[in-house]
Image (tube, helix red, strand yellow):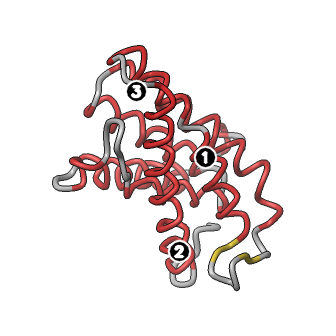
């Protein structure tokens, strides 16, 4: 992904992804469930766009950083943003090859399912942040943020796959 060769369309699409991510995170009533030890971010479904076009990793990361800055401040912007950048990029790299396969009787795309599990486990970064900043119990917070992440990603996997039948995310 060479951002020096991006077109105006690429920049606009990346900005749109970031903006949608922010709106789905900070807009009431969604903001009430988007932050803290118990979270279900509707915006996390946007992570799956990176499987269609890696350029969306940038928009997802920027959207996450803006949302985290608004919600919890600069530390969360950095920790959550870097975590999103690293783990979405790694997830696409590791699981993209499974895009054509299905699991659970065809319910889920195998790449999306594996990514959901992987990304949920990455919530140790958020649990560690919450432990350091607010002295929340690390393992319990990792569990609660991980379960919330898994639930939002599994719902998102279904939504994005349905949308991909109507919208060509590969462009």
Residue at 66%, 64% in the rendered image: 113
Q: Quadrant of the C terminus?
A: bottom right
Q: Is mark 3 on a helix, strand or loop?
A: helix
Mark 2 or mark 1: whose residue is earlier in sequence: 1
Residue at 66%, 55% in the rendered image: 115
- Gap between marks 1 and 3 measured at Cα: 18 Å
Q: Is mark 1 on a helix, strand or loop?
A: helix
Q: Tell me whether circle 2 and circle 3 mark residues in contact (CB < 8 Å).
A: no
Q: Quadrant of the N terminus?
A: top right
Q: How crowded is mark 1: few (under 14 residues within 10 Å), some or many (20 or more)?
A: many
Disc 2 target residue:
158
Residue placed most toward the observer, 163 or 155: 155
Residue at 68%, 73% in the rendered image: 109
Residue at 64%, 39% in the rendered image: 87
Q: Residues within 10 Å of mark 2 (few under 14, many from 20)?
A: some
The nearer-to-camera label among 1 and 3 is: 1
Disc 1 target residue:
119
- Gap between marks 2 and 3 measured at Cα: 28 Å
- Gap between marks 2 and 1 measured at Cα: 16 Å
Q: Which residue lies furthest to the left in this view?
A: 28
Q: Which residue lies furthest to the right in this view?
A: 97
Disc 3 target residue:
77
Percent position (x, y) of residue 34? 31, 46
Reply above or below: 50 against 38.
below
């Amino acid at each position: 992904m060479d951002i020096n060769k991006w077109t105006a369309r690429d920049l606009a699409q990346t900005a749109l992804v970031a903006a949608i991510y922010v709106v789905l995170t900070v807009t009431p009533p969604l903001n009430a469930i988007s932050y803290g030890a118990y979270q279900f971010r509707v915006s996390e479904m946007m992570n799956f766009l990176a499987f269609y076009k890696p350029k969306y990793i940038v928009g997802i990361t920027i959207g996450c950083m803006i949302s985290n800055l608004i919600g919890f401040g600069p530390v969360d912007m950095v920790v959550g943003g870097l975590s999103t950048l690293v783990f979405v990029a790694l997830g696409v790299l590791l699981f993209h090859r499974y895009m054509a396969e299905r699991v659970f009787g065809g319910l889920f795309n195998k790449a999306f399912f594996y990514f959901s599990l992987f990304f949920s486990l990455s919530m140790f970064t958020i649990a560690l942040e919450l432990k350091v900043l607010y002295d929340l119990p690390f393992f319990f917070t990792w569990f609660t943020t991980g379960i919330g992440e898994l639930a939002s990603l599994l719902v998102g996997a279904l939504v994005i796959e349905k949308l991909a039948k109507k919208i060509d995310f590969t462009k």
